Amino acid sequence: MVPITFLRRLLGRDNPPEIVEPRVVPAAPEVAPRAPVVAAPPVAVACPYCGVVLEPPPTSSRLCPRCRHRIIVRHAEGRAIYLTEDAVQVYVAEREREAEVEAWTHQRRNWLQLARGVSAPADKRKRLETAPLTEATVRSARSLYLITVEHSVRAARREKRWDEVARLRQRQAAALYEEAGGEPPPSEEVLALHREAMNANLRALQAVSREAELVGATCCAACRADDDRIFKIADELRTPRLPHAGCPRGLCSCDWWPVVRKAAPKRRRRTTRASPAVVPRITAAEDPAGDT
């Protein structure tokens, strides 16, 4: 009889069963749940008279559906403003005041920058810069620049610094032209200042040349027609042509450049050499002092 242990060995049942460890799968990282996107509730618009909610909000002036008063709609900075009829005048006045203050701020800053460019006293500029913003403050800043630039021009003219006179007058003319709105034609005061600047430029060029070349702009036919033309400086000082009349810019950007002509080379005269004098040969018969 075959032992039972032998049969178990043949069938493989006497081997201990293999223990298979379970495979551990790493857990996925936890993701925080995303908060749902909730649209902001629309801002309720109420009637400025009775307070009833207006749905939908009006985009233009109309009557309230409840109290039948007229709702005035104004748009500013990308949003609608709902006003009563009595509040419109206050709203318009406030908007005009804001625009006025903004204009005064720009003008005062511009005049004080110009005053600093002509070396106006620093204490006066500082006092006007920190003063309350009013129309009188703007006028004071303007007067400070104009008085200072006038003193600077007179000093430069006495010392014949014509380049500086041209720069100061041209900047002054541009500032006054911009203040007037920059629309042609310029005033006579502005034209006179610009002409003085061009004449000072010609006087500066007169030190190196008797002629000047007009470098014309491309803004109009008159400016293009005079481009690269050469004129005598003395004639232009008597009858200035800049700025061109009818230029759409009002103050054209044409300018004067010096003209330096090279002197023509001198031709050397050809001198003819004198031929040597021929001394006639005197024979003994013709010589009265000779021996007979």
Image (cartoon, rainbow, N blue to C red):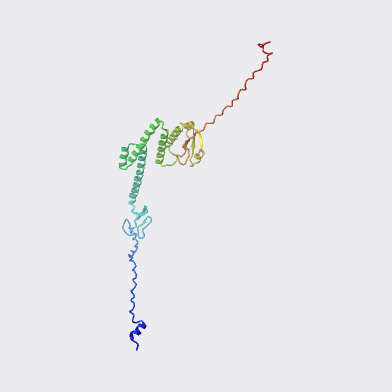
Tell which residue pokes out farthest to the top in this image.
Answer: 292
- Classify 69 as above or below 15: above
Write down the quadrant of residue 26 in the picture. bottom left
Q: Position of residue 68 (x, y in %)?
A: 34, 57
Write down the quadrant of residue 47 in the picture. bottom left
Residue 86 appears in view: no
In this view, the residue in front, 89 or 22, is: 22
In this view, the residue in front, 223 or 98, is: 223
- Classify 170 as above or below 47: above
Q: Which residue: 31% across, 40% down?
A: 126
Write down the quadrant of residue 194 in the picture. top left
Q: Position of residue 95 (x, y in %)?
A: 35, 48
Q: Going by the image, does 112 lie left or right of 203?
A: left
In this view, the residue in front, 106 or 12, is: 12
**Count of labels in the image:** 0
Q: Position of residue 261 (x, y in %)?
A: 51, 33
Q: Which residue: 36% across, 40% down?
A: 113
Q: Quadrant of the C terminus?
A: top right
Q: Quadrant of the N terminus?
A: bottom left
- Classify 60 as above or below 175: below
Tell which residue pokes out farthest to the bottom in this image.
Answer: 1
Residue 178 appears in view: yes
Q: Position of residue 116 (x, y in %)?
A: 35, 38
